[in-house]
Image: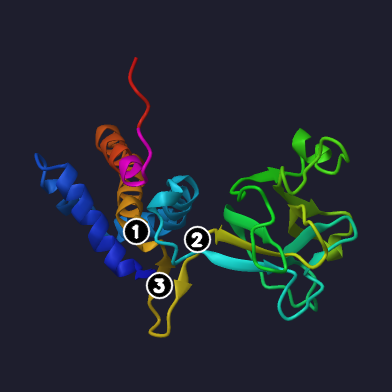
Amino acid sequence: MTYSLSTIFDDVRTAIDEIALNDATFISSQDNGEMETIIRQKATQAADHVHLNADLSRFYGDEFVMLSCPATPASDYAYVDSSLVGHIILNSNSNNQGVPHRNLLRLVHAMVYTPQGTERWSYPVNAVIQDHENEYAELRDPYFGASTERPAVALHRSFSVPLLSYDELELHKFGTATDTAIVRIIEHAQIATDNNGQKTIAVDQNLYHAFILQLAALLQTTYNETDRANALFALATREMGIEPPSQP
């Protein structure tokens, strides 16, 4: 869901007031313009932290982006190769490629389906193997690599030809060339401008309160209010469905 920064400013102030009940003068003592600048600078950081780390059961899903492979209609940028590995190009710096720019933050869910619509993979995948990790080299091993029983999703970055560099998801792997894949991702947050000229940011609606708490904590950190920041970080973590580490 999309929220205006003006609404976010007010909600962050409210969150700080609630955590600093014994010092109601904190907000009134700060320069509003300075606070709003800090909040604007930290908003994407807070949204990305929440979207990247929150338990998947907490998401509403309104900010999920759905991708398919092969693409519909057919496209060179979502296809299955001769090794039955699916490819979804997320972005390209070539001006004439027509690839939608997808700035991947998190893989939510990937599944390959048979032509009859049943699940081909033995389980859905929600983690990405980076192409610099040791596991990436093992994916295509004919004996120990990925298969429909041991599916995997990898992120491959190509820089071999600078004018044609790209990022792509590799889906290891399909059972037949006529299988299809559905992939859901979350993109990095961005500040946008709506039709009324208002600055906005998109946050999963179920995680908005966690986002506000995280953003308020980042603001407090900037002001060196360590105790308040830690209290707000802890509240945000709980809202994200993550239990804080136990104390020794």
Task: Give me the disc on residue 206.
Answer: 1
The answer to whether mark 3 and mark 1 are in CB contact below 8 A is: no
Residue at the spot x=33%, y=19% of the render?
Answer: 247
Residue at the spot x=88%, y=41% of the render?
Answer: 142
Mark earlier in primary sequence (2, 3)? 2
Amino acid type assigned to the residue bearing label 3 in the image: Lys
Task: Give me the disc on residue 199.
Answer: 3
Q: Nearer the viewer, residue 248 or 5?
A: 248
Nearest to the eye among marks 2 and 3: give it: 2
Q: Is residue 171 left or right of residue 211?
A: right
Amino acid type assigned to the residue bearing label 1 in the image: Asn
Nearest to the eye among marks 3 and 1: give it: 1
Work out how far the residue at label 2 is from the one at label 3, CA to CA, in angstroms: 13 Å
The magenta-colored residue range is 236-243
The residue singled out by tag 2 in the image is: 189
The image quadrant where one finds the C terminus is top left
